[in-house]
Amino acid sequence: MLHHGIDASNIDHLEIISNTKRYARSFFVSSLPRMAIFPELFRDLYLFGDINTSIYINPIPEAKSQNELNRVINQLETERIVAADRGNINRQSTVGQKRYEAEQLRDEIAAGFNKLYEASIISTLFAYSIEDLDKFTSLLATEMSKSLVGVKSAWAMQEDAFKSNLPLMNNKIKKVHTFDRRSMGTVFPFTTSEIGHPTGVPLGFNKQTGVPILFDNFHPSLTNYNMVIFAKSGAGKSVTMKTLISRSAVLMGIESLALDAEGEYSIVAESLGGINVVLGPSSKTIINLFDIEQEVVKDEITGRERAVLNVENKVEDVTQALLTMARGSTRSTEVNELTKQIIAEVVGEEYAHFGITRGPSKFIRIYTRWS
């Protein structure tokens, strides 16, 4: 007959007996860095394999916060005076900085811009053997030390720590740390080890889980198909984009258009059977800034749709483009608002000369070369 339950006879771990035996060890956060940075503070804790984490947050009343901070400020001032009498310049400077930060925090709380909280962070790590549990424990401590977070095993309190980590809102070990409002905001786990989509093109592997990452710009779970890639120079931004373009074209039939100022996507286009359109001073291909197309608008009174030429907006667009070209080709201070006004008047006269107005005019293209 198989018995189910938890063996709490060990002082440094628990044995969970069910269909298969598992081992659990609970921890609490024992030390924190001076500065809390999102999402680095507890990210490794949240994403560390088979682990559960609970955070108990209790706001500290303003009166208690003020009294506690005043006590800390007085204590720091005493330490500063002692360090000054002993000629310990480094200690005096360090304590003076801490006193300044405590005073600043006290003033922020008094003005209602900040608040103090007591928080207790408890985690329970699971494994299928005691050897793996010891190995994971050592690895967890190493990973957390990278962000200057110290974790300790709840030695001789494993049962209470395990119960505290259950969704029962009952903290039995009371190992608390003090946070202000800004640092408290960094503990919320707005990160996940699961990324990607069920469909799309493969981009790599998830280092946390080893699962292939599929990405689909047009997946219904996304609000739109825009994306942005940030990374330092040489990290692989262009390689990632070329990989996404190439595999999307081959696997999903997606056509891509690259506005490439440096000409590094020409090989990708040729490999995929695409074309390269070169724009330059010696190129026969040009962009006609003056090209204007009809727009369909709905009459506010009748509700009927009609075709119009929005010449005013087109004149503004052409003016801005020509002004940018003028600023790029000369360093003269004469390229200013007066220059913009002159360009706008000349462009407007050009459209008027061809009889292009806002009304339902005939479709006309203007090809003009500026020297």
Image: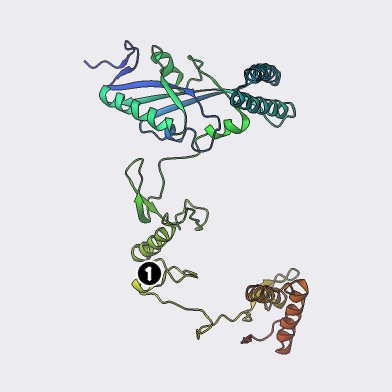
The one of 290 and 147 positioned closer to us in this rendering: 147
Residue reaching furthest to the left: 1
**In x, y percent, where is residue 77?**
68, 19
Residue 22 or 46: which is nearer the viewer? 46
**Up/down of 5 relative to 89, above or below:** above
In the displayed structure, does residue 116 sit left or right of residue 254? right
Which residue is rendered at x = 51% and y = 20% of the image?
169
Image quadrant occupied by the C terminus: bottom right
Q: How many residues crowd around disc 1 within 10 Å: few (fewer than 14), some, or many (20 or more)? A: some
Left or right: 279 in relation to 7: right
| Residue 88 drawn at (x, y percent) | 60, 22
- Residue 139 horizontal side relative to residue 36, left or right: left
> Which residue is painted at 37% across and 61% down in the image?
243
Where, quadrant-wise, is the N terminus in this rendering?
top left
Choose top left, top right, bottom left or bottom right for residue 161. top left
Which quadrant of the view contains residue 96?
A: top right
Indicate the secondary structure of the residue bearing disc 1. Answer: helix
- Most extreme residue toward the front is 87
Residue 365 place in picture, x, y as percent: 62, 86
Residue type at tag 1: Val
Would you place residue 113 above or below residue 124 in this image? below
* Residue identified by numbered label 1: 268
User: Is 67 displayed left or right of 168 in the figure?
Assistant: right
Q: Position of residue 98 (x, y in %)?
A: 63, 26
Q: Quadrant of residue 71?
A: top right
- Let me know if residue 16 appears in the view: yes
